[in-house]
Image (tube, rainbow, N blue to C red):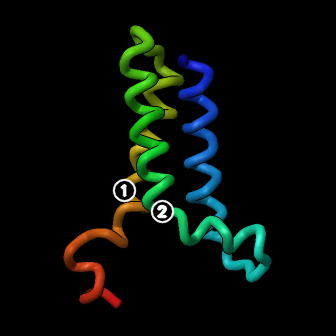
Amino acid sequence: MRTFGWVLLVLVVLMTVASLLNKQRWWVRMFDLPRAQGIVLGIVAIVLFGISGPLNGMEWSALGVLFICLVYQSHEYSPTHRFRQ
């Protein structure tokens, strides 16, 4: 389960980083739209890490990075998002 959690974690982080790039290629821009799916995958990764046993320092750090990515991905769903544009 922990391996699947790592795969999901890396996928969500890569999706977030790719959406930050200022490239107009389709393989980079395709990560702009599935924000809700990325949030769900990130939550599943956190749950998998949580039920797989005690975590070491590297796993806590990776979960911190994942949390930051989830906060960034979810900013579009905040109630004040339309006022910030």
Up/down of 42 relative to 45, above or below: below
- Of 41 and 16, the residue lying toward us: 41
Callout 2: SS: helix
For marks 2 and 1, give the one nearer the viewer: 2
- Tell which circle, 2 or 1, labels the residue nearer the N-terminal end: 2
Q: Is residue 43 left or right of residue 15?
A: left
Quadrant where the C terminus sits is bottom left
Q: Is residue 27 left or right of residue 38?
A: right
CA gap, disc 2 and disc 1: 11 Å
Query: Residue 59 in the image: x percent, y percent?
Result: 50, 24
Quadrant where the N terminus sits is top right
Query: Residue 65 in the image: x percent, y percent?
Result: 48, 43
Label 1 crowding class (10 Å Cα cut-off): few <14, some 14-19, many 20+?
few
Query: Residue 17 in the image: x percent, y percent?
Result: 61, 59
Up/down of 3 relative to 78, above or below: above
- Of 27 and 70, the residue lying toward us: 27
> Which residue in the structure is indicated by mark 2?
35
Please identify the residue farthest to the left as the structure is shown: 79
Q: Quadrant of residue 51?
A: top left
Disc assigned to residue 4: none
Up/down of 40 relative to 64, above or below: below
Residue type indicated by callout 1: Val
> Which residue in the structure is indicated by mark 1?
71
Q: Quadrant of residue 80?
A: bottom left
Tell me the residue at 74%/82% (across/down).
24
Q: Quadrant of residue 71?
A: bottom left
Tell me the residue at 58%/49% (across/down).
13
Tell me the residue at 56%/48% (across/down).
12
Residue type indicated by callout 2: Arg
Callout 1: SS: helix
